[in-house]
Image (cartoon, rainbow, N blue to C red):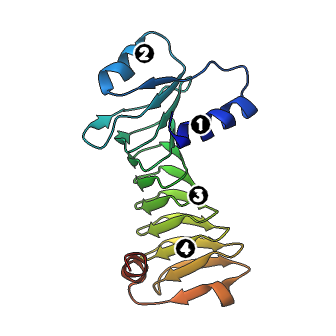
């Protein structure tokens, strides 16, 4: 097993020792076959060459994508870990870890941890901590904690907490205690943060 699965397995045992060991799947057909057979804990590690449209994750099923899996989800809860890529829409709830990249649309909710990178649009709700990086626009709501780096524009709302560093354009609504030291107002915050990360 790779490192993200080991990390998640330890977490699963600590928080839910009564749950069965996860089933690891590598393609969409295996995923649906195990779901139909009643599996309740699935880890998908399919690689970057496949696109998996997982639809709505059933409430009774724990699904994790890891490695370099590329997937989309329209509802339910999912964990994204490793260096995977996930598009989350509608009422999906995502917990992102490691270096996961998540694009959140509509009213999706994301808890970003580790060094995950989140792009939020529409009315996505993003809670970021540790060293997560968030690019937010339209009507997103972002809670920035830990050592996160946030770039926000349009009518986004950002609550600053901890040592988060926030770059925003003039229309963004800011709340929180650390506005004076951790807030920078710039014309194109998303471009500035992207340029900084690409150095």
Disc 3 + disc 4, Cβ < 8 Å: no
Q: Distance between the residues labelled 1 and 2?
A: 21 Å
Q: Mark 4 points at which residue?
A: 149
Disc 3 versus disc 4: distance between alpha carbons?
A: 12 Å
Residue 114 is marked as: 3
Residue 108, image x, y percentages: 47, 49
> According to the image, label 1 marks what residue?
6
Residue drawn at the location 42% of the way across and 15% of the way down:
34
Label 3 sits on a secondary structure element that is: loop
- Tell me if label 4 and label 1 are in contact, CB under 8 Å: no
Tell me residue 72's x, y (percent).
Answer: 35, 41
Question: Is the Cβ of the residue at disc 1 closer than 8 Å to that at disc 3?
Answer: no
Task: Nearest to the eye among marks 3 and 4: give it.
Answer: 3
Q: For mark 2, what is the residue?
A: 34
Q: In this view, does 177 lie to the left or right of 30?
A: right
Q: Earlier in the sequence, mark 3 or mark 2?
A: 2
Identify the mark at residue 33; answer none if there is no mark. Answer: none
Looking at the rendered structure, the secondary structure element under dot 4 is: strand
Going 41% across and 52% down the picture, which residue do you hit?
106
In the image, 171: left or right of 7? left
Mark pair 1, 3: CA separation: 15 Å
* Quadrant of the drawing holding the C terminus: bottom left
Q: Position of residue 59 (x, y in %)?
A: 54, 27
């Amino acid at each position: 097993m790779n490192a993200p699965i080991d990390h998640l397995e330890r977490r699963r045992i600590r928080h839910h020792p009564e749950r069965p060991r996860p089933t690891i799947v590598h393609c969409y057909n295996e995923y649906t076959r195990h779901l139909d057979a009643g599996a309740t804990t699935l880890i998908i590690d399919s690689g970057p060459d496949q696109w998996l449209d997982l639809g709505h994750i059933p409430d009774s099923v724990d699904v994790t994508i890891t490695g370099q899996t590329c997937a989309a989800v329209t509802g339910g809860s999912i964990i994204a870990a490793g260096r995977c890529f996930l598009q989350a829409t509608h009422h999906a709830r995502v917990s992102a870890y490691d270096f996961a990249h998540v694009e959140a649309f509509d009213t999706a909710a994301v808890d970003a941890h580790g060094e995950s990178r989140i792009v939020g649009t529409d009315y996505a709700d993003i809670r970021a901590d540790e060293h997560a990086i968030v690019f937010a626009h339209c009507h997103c709501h972002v809670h920035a904690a830990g050592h996160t780096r946030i770039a926000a524009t349009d009518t986004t709302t950002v609550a600053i907490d901890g040592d988060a560093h926030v770059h925003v354009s003039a229309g963004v609504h800011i709340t929180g205690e650390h506005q004076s030291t951790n807030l920078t107002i710039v014309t194109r915050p998303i471009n500035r943060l992207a340029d900084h990360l690409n150095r």
